[in-house]
Amino acid sequence: MKKVTISDIANKLNMTPSTVSRALANNKRISESTRKKVQDTSKEMGYQPNVMAASLRKGTSDTIGMIVPRINRHFFSNVISGVEEILNPAGFNLVVIQSGELLSREVKAVESLLQNRVGGIILSLSLQTNTFEHLQDVVKHNTPLVQFDRVTKSLPGSKITNDNYTGGYLATRHLIKCGFKHVAHFSGSYKLRAYRERKAGYIAALEEAGMRVDEKLIVDDVITREAGYSQIHKLVMRTNADAVFCAGDYSALGAMEGLKSLGYHIPDQFGIVGFANEPFSELMDPSLSSVEQNALEMGNKVAAAMIKAIQKEEVPEEEVIPVRFIGRSSSWKDYK
Amino acid sequence: MKKVTISDIANKLNMTPSTVSRALANNKRISESTRKKVQDTSKEMGYQPNVMAASLRKGTSDTIGMIVPRINRHFFSNVISGVEEILNPAGFNLVVIQSGELLSREVKAVESLLQNRVGGIILSLSLQTNTFEHLQDVVKHNTPLVQFDRVTKSLPGSKITNDNYTGGYLATRHLIKCGFKHVAHFSGSYKLRAYRERKAGYIAALEEAGMRVDEKLIVDDVITREAGYSQIHKLVMRTNADAVFCAGDYSALGAMEGLKSLGYHIPDQFGIVGFANEPFSELMDPSLSSVEQNALEMGNKVAAAMIKAIQKEEVPEEEVIPVRFIGRSSSWKDYK
DNA sequence: GCATTGTGTGCAAACGATTGTATTTTTGTA
DNA sequence: TACAAAAATACAATCGTTTGCACACAATGC
């Protein structure tokens, strides 16, 4: 395997590596004629630039690191696709690392990316993350940082999130408009801003409708299918709830199964709305109303913010991606 | 941002960079005492190795490239997780690139990975890929190559696949045992070995049961939900089929919807089995029988093969991962 | 006591590109 | 034709490691 270097080209053309380098980089100090000559012969000789040499010299690379909790979540994998859509054509490479929702792995991932001198880091915090020292390192390295979805304000750089508030508001308003009188809410961990915001939207919709906010109808830390199943049992036993807005589709799924097991008819006797519009939500029976997050667009915005940050342009501090409510059978009663 | 280099440590300890380098690499030519000294002060000074410098010198890196058709497919994202499980603890980094099922992007991805001098390439071919020149480059570069799921035998290196044959066999045998008399098969593109093998398993089960193989009952290129929906209509109109083994869950989903729309009762009047055990399959109504591919285990095996290849150990030419049939309501009639 | 082996370190040359500065060539102008 | 200004190219240092080789020194064998 013979590898063609920049000085091989230089030798062949009787010039110096520096000229070749500049010619390949389209530097204006090089005349049009030699530039053409260089680019032609480089192609002809099958020259492949050595990225490492360049990065070593420049101190930074065209590789962007991205840390996500889990890659096999519909939302995250689509954000990744959205990021790639923009980054690849712009000449960047993306390396994705999973934190597995563990702080320790997030720390290691950051360390590894910094060691590899990535050009920037895209991050969505793990559930476990409660300290941000490892990210201070990113700041110290002057490595651009873009956060998305699960973000912390305690760090500089762009933060791109979903409009969770409006999502919660729309979901709840829909249930109210469908005639449900006692809308409950299954939330997640209040440590995450996303869940606090969804809850705030829920409350806003209730208040707008002049309905009382009943703390007994609000349950937190219900995000899994299992939790949804067990909590819905408690809810219908102890309260007069006739609908629930779940902060995630998995808990909504569990809730639906729980209600079915109790003999409830959905949506006539109980309305359900989820969040995230997981692929399965439209396949359920009855199909599940949900709030769609535009993961692809979020990915695009994230990538765009990263490129701007790399080019030292002005970056948006916070950007909010709109969500869309999708009404399906699980809630659609007599809408007015 | 001060960056500590290997010679900073050397200066501080009055030795040369080479000694420090060897000490950090646990080279046996370095005495225990200095090794300890070096490792202690390197930690103390906050030394972070510069991966690019090392890779440049060594001509290869600890980064493994992985090219998959789509990251947001349940199967692939789980294989990725499985690969990471093994690779990360072993000190390797994984960079994932999507080909989007396009040959052009696969070619670019290979090129980019080779330019980055990755230590190895893990690959699952795109649907479009019908030429393998770009992969000959990988061979020429002496870069270890491990293929999985969608593989071609025309290249050296490990090939790790699912036991598609047995999957097809088990699925079909189950339908037969449930009393279905005319089992049809929705396959994918015969260009892919996986689909040919699933079909072969299907045929084997029929023959074992002494049932006739009816070509009219076998339809290829049915992998999407839409195709499943439309093809099942044609099937029930034109043939006497009373069950179908679909080579994918999406087409099975479409088939089920189509049958429901025609008023069929499942599984009493028609049995369905899918393939892949997508997350939604157990959530459908009725829940969908399917063949589970152990994506995580496949990922583990892939990573293990890659590590072996990098260390120039003997690698398995072909490895087959067992599958598991999961019987659910869509097929479970009177099993005997 | 001298050659031989073995340890532990130092020296210096790579790896392949980039880039500030020097040098040459070309161009423009009087 | 001369000479400054501008344009194009050459020189050489540099990025941070790794590694073959040389070298010093101690231990061993005869």
Image (cartoon, coloured by chain):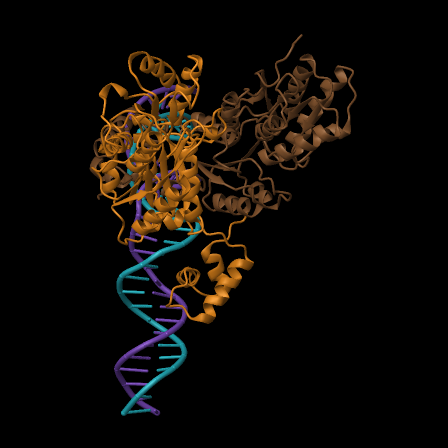
Chain colours: A orange, B brown, C cyan, D purple
- In the figure, is residue B4 to the left or right of A259? left
For the residue pair B233 and A136, the one nearer the viewer reads as B233
- In the figure, is residue B270 to the left or right of A34? right
Work out whether A102 lies above or below B48. Answer: above
Residue found 67% across the figure and 31% down from its top: B233
For the residue pair B143 and B260, the one nearer the viewer reads as B260
* Quadrant position of the N terminus of chain B in the picture: top left
Residue found 66% across the figure and 19% down from its top: B269
* Quadrant position of the C terminus of chain B in the picture: top right
- In the figure, is residue A33 to the left or right of B160? left
Residue B163's image quarter? top right
**Percent coordinates x, y for residue A318 in the rendering:** 26, 44
For the residue pair A78 and B313, the one nearer the viewer reads as A78
* Residue B93 visible: no
For the residue pair B334 and A179, the one nearer the viewer reads as A179
Residue A209's image quarter? top left
**Percent coordinates x, y for residue B306 in the rendering:** 51, 30
